[in-house]
Image (tube, coloured by chain):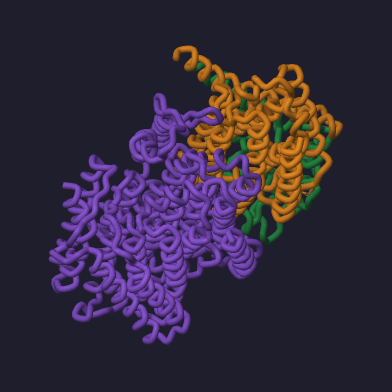
Chain colours: A purple, B green, C orange
Amino acid sequence: MKELLVFILIVSPFMFAVLCSIIKSDKIRSFVVLAMGIILSVSSLLLITKVPFSFSPKSVFTIKVNHIIEVSDFLLLFLMLFFAFKYKSILIRIFVIFQMVFVSYFDFFLKQNHSDYPTIYCDHLSLIMVLIISIIGSLICFQAVPYMKEHEHHLNIHPAISKQRGFFFVMVLFLGAMNGLALSNDMMFFYFFFEVTTICSFLLIGHDQTEVAIKNSIRALWMNSLGGCAFIVAIVWIYSQIGTLDIQEIIRTYGNAKYYVLPLALICLAGFTKSAQFPFQSWLLGAMVAPTPVSALLHSSTMVKVGVYIVLRFSPVFKGIFLSQCVALCGAFAFLAGAALAVGQSNGKKVLAYSTISNLGLILACAGINTPAAHTAAILLIIFHAVTKALLFMCVGTIEQHIASRDIEDMRGLYAEMPITALITVMGVITMIMPPFGLLLGKWMAMEAAARNLLVILMVSLGSALTVMYWARWAGTLMSDPFAGKFKLESQPILTWIPLLSLCSLASVLSFLAPLVYTKMIVPDLNSNFIPFDIHRGIFENSYGQFPVVPLCLIAILGFGVAVWAVKSAASSRIVPPYLSGAQTAEPGTFTGPMNQLVKSEARNYYLSRIFGEKRLTTCINLAAGVWLILMVGGTL
Amino acid sequence: MIGIKKFISKMRTKSPWLLHFDCGSCNGCDIEVLACLTPVYDVERFGIINVGNPMHADILLVTGTVNHRNKVVLINLFNQMPDPKIVVAIGACGLSGGIFRDAYNVVGGVDKVIPVDVYVPGCPAKPEAIIDGVVAGLSKL
Amino acid sequence: MITDLVLAIFCIVFVPVLGGFISGIDRIITARFQSRVGPPLLQPFYDVIKLFGKEKVVVNVWQAFCAYCYIAAASISIVMFFFKSDLLLILFVQAVGAIFLVVGALSSTSPFSQVGAHRELLQILSYEPLLVLVVVGMYLEVDSFKIWKIYEWNEPLILKLPFLFIVLGYALTIKLRKSPFDLSTSHHAHQELVKGVLTDYSGPFLGLIEIAHWYETVLVLGLCSLFWATNWIGGFILVAITYILEIIIDNVSARMTWRWMLGYVWAMGITLSVVNMVWLSLV
Ligand code: SF4
């Protein structure tokens, strides 16, 4: 049974991807995507009852798995090399050839046939990743169907030369690769899937084939290849030290004896590039040119989580050493810097991108703090960030197609035009920054876990305040409208509504269930006797802190009910125009100016760009982060 | 219910918040209005606050003549005030247009545009008179 | 369970009364500083009751929503304080209220509310990290974020955390809307932004916000009292002195710009906190 499920989760998306690429009819293709999404979600849910398990699949379609991976590794690298030559990128060429040398050295010289070990391993951490990928990923793919149609319509692409087949091929294939990555226990498997996600990201960023898109996709490719290089060096190094590729075995061995930890630092480095931590953030920002479902799927909820996932996976190994401290500091710094840069942005997608970097930084900081409580925080943040950020990206995508802009200023008063989408977006923002929702629960745990670490807590507390600033500003802007009363609800394709509404409810309901998630999914994984939090009556509690999730949720529901009633009753009150020094006219938002002319009153948001502007901060931040990274890798020598 | 209503209307008289609108006054009356806030008169003793915002105000103090340009503003401000509200016209100008009443641009007193509850005469009106006017208005709240 | 409920209801009802009295005393003392007599002690209550009797006027219905959310969050945070719950969480809950106040102000298109709302956000940005640092400092000393652990501690925290108390003072000044940090709105006569963040709230909704502000006042003063939690007289004296100092500062200083506020408060707050925490770890 579990073999079958794993097969469905990893291999079937590849088959569905091929199907997507050959089906010409849009309708049938949407149907295939829908079917795949349902199958993946159901199998991932079925997997819950099976964990933890491990096994070693011998062959797929009678071909040995190892051979498939080895051959595909080379195919993939050659593909990258092809792109490197096509776009004449020196950097990619260097990195790809570097990887090829190492992979061949490993495959042909180093690797020995050794005893069996499970190549597939699924504990609760992997399961959480699989659930996120399969459920949220499928929802995003659903939304991509109407989105891409509209997208191509908008770009005036004739259906005959539609590139949707290629698009869905990569999107669907990516889901399989991600599942593979989460479930594999063999370093080479992991590396292979790691590279697949890199190339998927590259292809999807470049999807529109505009000049900017191509430029940004190349940047993404070389930065991620750098991560690949770090990873393959780490693999070879570890293998020559302890002679195994089994990740669990590596964690055990490294944990017990004192080894050189430089390979671990390299793995962290690979994680940092994948998670677009400073100074590698530019590829993620560039990736925002891609169609929004891509940003939602790859660049916020799943692929960038790979980085934090591997660091978290290996974090027990570097517990208590300098590297751990460095990871914590780097993460906290990224949290602060990402939030600061997000404050300076008025481009909605860029705000989301910086906020993603910032949150990933917080997760890394938790991994670096490396206590059971911090790990709990990290995992909760992974889950809730994936849900909420996917939701917000979808909202921005939907809004963008409607108003043809992704600038926050253009979304002013969007509530009048798209009430439902605007409300869902505001709800997304609320789940992002407010208790009792899951992200704040995670942040709270992170802060309490970090409290003994002066620098980390300092940066986290500053970053947290900045985070509040840019989210609240956005939510307010959406509602900023002089009208009141009845609105016409907007109409959207059903495949847009389903993902939006289900993610919105997932974000809120899952917070309510956070204690359950914790006991069922996180505790079994902490493999220590020390349980960071006790749960009674829905209250997270330990010796130093207390977070009554369920009671707060109940009160929040109550408060929400009262507030909704307040809106209902306020609708009957007298509506007056906003205060404009008494000079307002019948035309909303205008006042009588000189010569009896109507002048529109305008107030823009504060973006504080003189303090938090990209131009001003990026260089300093990159420099600081670069020094920090060098310290991290160099410090292990 | 009647008890509560009575109670609230009693509170109204204890906390009148003012909006002072200079409707083309020569600034004579304005200075007298502001004088009421100084330690000499200290109207905060009666809970009176100058709020400068129609949304919060209970009493609209209008100084000066109404002209064609600013009558719209006066009406707007008046409409933005939540009920119950009263209007106090101050100074000869506010009452009837005063010495400017024959000017080509002048509409006349405040009551040409909005309903006025209390008239405070004087050129300028004395601070004591203004306070008296406000207190007289309170009984209408 | 029943006693819990009674305590909760008691503090929801009692705290605004306390907050109103504090505000009344504040107004009288301020008036005396300006050689005026000042309003009666009960003036804040008159004001709020009057506001509830006024006509409901809104610019945007979401203002009503936000006003209710603000007072809900403020009252929940104070209830949690009385239940001696987790300090960090209380700060987060309190922040929810502040955010809703801002969002409600942003929902009006009036430039005065808009700018006021952004200034309020900048105020939140300035004081929020300081409050977190203060709480973290307390944690370092008593090894817990829970308030009852602080009450169990056998020596006043201010002896170990003097600089953090000053840091809390900065946050307090901003939170109480005192000069030089009363950028977004102020208690005094109208300012350059009319009423800033409160401009377009009116009638009952303004009344709700006023009550919510009382809750918050009590909450931050409660935070102050934790610095001398060994006996209540000490706590009371500490709070009283602090509050008088706040009023003096309010009366002797002019309103400054947000740029100055952010730079100054962060610089002072972070330096003092770091000094105090390092000192704590050395002793
Ligand atoms: S009444 Fe006299 S003092 Fe007042 S505005 Fe008119 S002219 Fe000036």
**In this picture, residue A264 sits left or right of residue C269:** left
Q: Is residue A79 visible?
A: yes
Q: Is residue A483 visible?
A: no
* Position of residue A504 measured from the top left corner of the image (x, y, whole percent): 34, 47
At 67% from the left and 56% from the top, the residue drawn is B106
Q: Is residue C105 above or below residue A553?
A: below
Name the quadrant containing residue A470: bottom right
* Position of residue A572 measured from the top left corner of the image (x, y, whole percent): 40, 38
At 35% from the left and 55% from the top, the residue drawn is A246
Q: Is residue C209 above or below residue A96?
A: above
Nearest the camera: A90 or B105? A90
* Position of residue A172 measured from the top left corner of the image (x, y, whole percent): 25, 64
At 49% from the left and 61% from the top, the residue drawn is A263
Q: Quadrant of the C terminus of chain B?
A: top right
At 46% from the left and 54% from the top, the residue drawn is A311
Nearest the camera: C170 or A447? A447
* Position of residue A582 measured from the top left corner of the image (x, y, whole percent): 60, 52
